[in-house]
Amino acid sequence: MYATLPLLLAAASLALAQYDYGSGSAATTTASAAASAASSSGSNHIVKVSNAAGDLSFTPNNITAAVGDTVEFHFYGPTHSVAQSTFAAPCAPANANAFFSGEITTTGTTANTEIFTYNVNSTSAIWIYCAYASHCENGMAAVINAPADGSKTLAMYQAAAAKVSGTTAPATVQGLVKGTLSTSTSSTSTSTSSSASASATKNAGVEARGGVKWAALGFTGVVAAVFGSLIV
């Protein structure tokens, strides 16, 4: 009878160690992992393609974005597009894989319900222009991650574009994610991210408390077994 006592106590110690009873480390680790996952999503940069006044502009036209960020284009009237170029050859497709939204025609002074999003996968400079006839030559251009050393600037690109005899549009609509405009795009995105983080943290806490609960029950069972064997 007494010989089994050390074995039972050892089993109790192992059960408690497995679940980190009382240390809270399981909850901390899981919650930290959840918070890390929630914070890994990038920022969304909204760019207006023209505006209510019909200006030949991108606003903002000089964007700094990290890998994992998105750049979301909102179109105003009358007709505009988003296309990828190079600094060396303004108002022309960068290559056969250059992204292109196609021409988007918008009536009225509000933004089109159709939007296009570019997923940033590099910090290299991305030069952008409107491929609708003569818009690029008249300064409708933008850049994502212009070189920090100032060797290539948007102003330089626009100056070179003004000398181009004609704008060339990419042959294929590609490279951008098509979507539908929400009137609260930014707040919705932020709210969803925060909710996901809070939910993940809450679930992590519930999971950890569940582990502690079962550890406590296991410990109670072991103690009961010890006293039962002593009584016998």
Image (tube, helix red, strand yellow):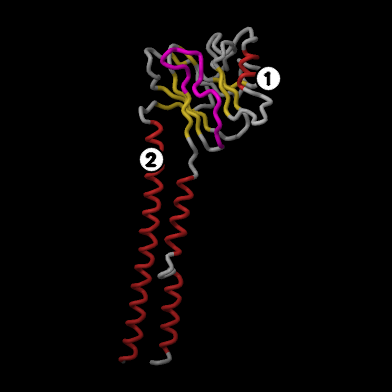
Q: Is residue 66 above or below residue 38?
A: above
Reply yes or no: does residue 212 show up in magenta.
no
Name the image quarter holding the N terminus: bottom left
- Residue located at (63% from left, 7% from top): 165
What is the crowding at mark 2: few (fewer than 14 residues within 10 Å), some, or many (at least 20)? few
Reply yes or no: does residue 56 show up in magenta.
yes
Q: Which residues are magenta?
A: 48-66
Reading the image, the residue beneath label 1 is 88
- Residue located at (39% from left, 31% from top): 185
Q: Is residue 78 above or below residue 61?
A: above
The answer to which quarter of the image holds residue 19 is bottom left
Name the image quarter holding the C terminus: bottom left
User: Residue 205 in the image: x percent, y percent?
Assistant: 38, 58
Q: Amino acid at mark 2?
A: Thr
Residue 192 got which mark? 2
Q: Are marks 2 and 1 in contact (CB under 8 Å)?
A: no
